[in-house]
């Protein structure tokens, strides 16, 4: 999908306000609704004809865990944004999502314009603050905490991964959306990850600079196993994960 057509000047303006010194804009065109925050990048894109569908491939790939994890899952979503994961995962009654969003205005936008389910409880905190104070453990952690290609500084902090680890069950898996501009940036992040987690893998994309990092203390399934699960339709999302699996690379600890 060509995201350049969804820019801050196209479509119908639905809502705008200033939040944390950034211009928050919600727009709509051709059956899609999206928002920008302080720039031209699309932060979230929703299909108005199927609001529970994840549209963008990067976010689709972050649901890859559905191919090998059970149905009864406690999920922590760090950086809720417009609530795409919350909408997509509400179709399963055995999945419970705890949502964290730093900006209360973005959380309000998700409820008012992006059909965030009323049942979703949102903690208004930074991801770093939440996992520092958290005493629960989750099966899955989804982490998407960058705006306009800039990560929160905690992504490079060993303490962040240590706190992330203690927030996960022993069998837990975390999927982290990264935007890295240099190989050195990625190596710095992987060094921190490998100090804490036993296994890691990357999903790369041909049309996006994003990388999704998967970390766990248990082995991440091999491509062959994931292809079989995908073929058998072993998930509730309706997503065909074959292309993501093709671009999955397991990383060996040095």
Image: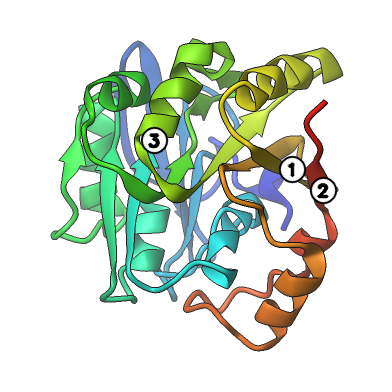
Tell me, yes or no, whether the two marked residues, 3 and 1, touch with CB atoms within 8 Å: no
Label whose residue precedes the other's in the sequence (1 or 2): 1
Tell me, yes or no, whether the two marked residues, 1 and 2, touch with CB atoms within 8 Å: yes
Asked if residue 80 can be seen in this view, the reply is: no
> Vertical placement of 206 versus 125: above or below?
below
| Residue that appears at 19% across and 35% down | 123
Label whose residue precedes the other's in the sequence (3 or 1): 3
Label whose residue precedes the other's in the sequence (2 or 3): 3
Q: Which residue is mark 1?
A: 202
Which label sits on residue 79? 3
In space, the residues marked 3 and 1 are separated at their CA atoms by 20 Å
Q: Which one is in front, 215 or 148? A: 215
| Residue that appears at 76% across and 35% down | 209
Q: Which residue is mark 2?
A: 249
Q: Which quadrant holds the C terminus? A: top right
Q: Residue 85 location in percent, x, y?
A: 41, 56
Q: Number of callouts in the render?
A: 3
In space, the residues marked 1 and 2 are separated at their CA atoms by 5 Å
> Vertical placement of 238 versus 196: above or below?
below
| Residue that appears at 62% across and 21% down | 195
In space, the residues marked 2 and 3 are separated at their CA atoms by 25 Å
Determine the image quadrant of residue 241.
bottom right
Asked if residue 217 can be seen in this view, the reply is: yes
């Amino acid at each position: 999908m060509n995201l350049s057509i969804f820019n801050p000047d196209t479509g119908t303006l639905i809502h705008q306000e200033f939040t944390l010194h950034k211009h928050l804009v919600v727009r709509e065109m051709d059956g899609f609704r999206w928002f920008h925050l302080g720039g031209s990048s699309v932060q979230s894109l929703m299909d108005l004809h199927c609001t529970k569908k994840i549209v963008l491939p990067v976010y689709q790939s972050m649901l890859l865990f559905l191919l090998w994890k059970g149905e009864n899952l406690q999920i922590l979503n760090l950086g809720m944004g417009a609530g795409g994961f919350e909408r997509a995962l509400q179709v399963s009654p055995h999945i419970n999502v705890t949502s964290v969003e730093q900006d209360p205005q973005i959380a309000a936008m998700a409820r008012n314009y992006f059909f965030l389910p009323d049942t979703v409880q949102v903690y208004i905190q930074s991801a770093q603050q939440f996992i520092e104070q958290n005493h629960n453990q989750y099966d899955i952690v989804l982490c998407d905490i960058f705006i306009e290609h800039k990560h929160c500084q905690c992504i490079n902090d060993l303490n962040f991964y240590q706190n992330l680890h203690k927030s996960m069950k022993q069998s837990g898996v975390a999927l982290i959306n990264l935007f890295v501009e240099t190989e050195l940036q990625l190596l710095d992040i992987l060094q921190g990850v490998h100090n804490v987690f036993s296994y890691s893998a990357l999903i790369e994309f041909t049309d996006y600079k994003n990388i999704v990092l998967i970390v766990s203390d248990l082995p991440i399934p091999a491509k062959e196993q994931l292809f079989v699960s995908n073929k058998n339709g072993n998930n509730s999302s309706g997503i065909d994960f074959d292309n993501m699996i093709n671009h999955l690379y397991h990383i060996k600890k040095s």
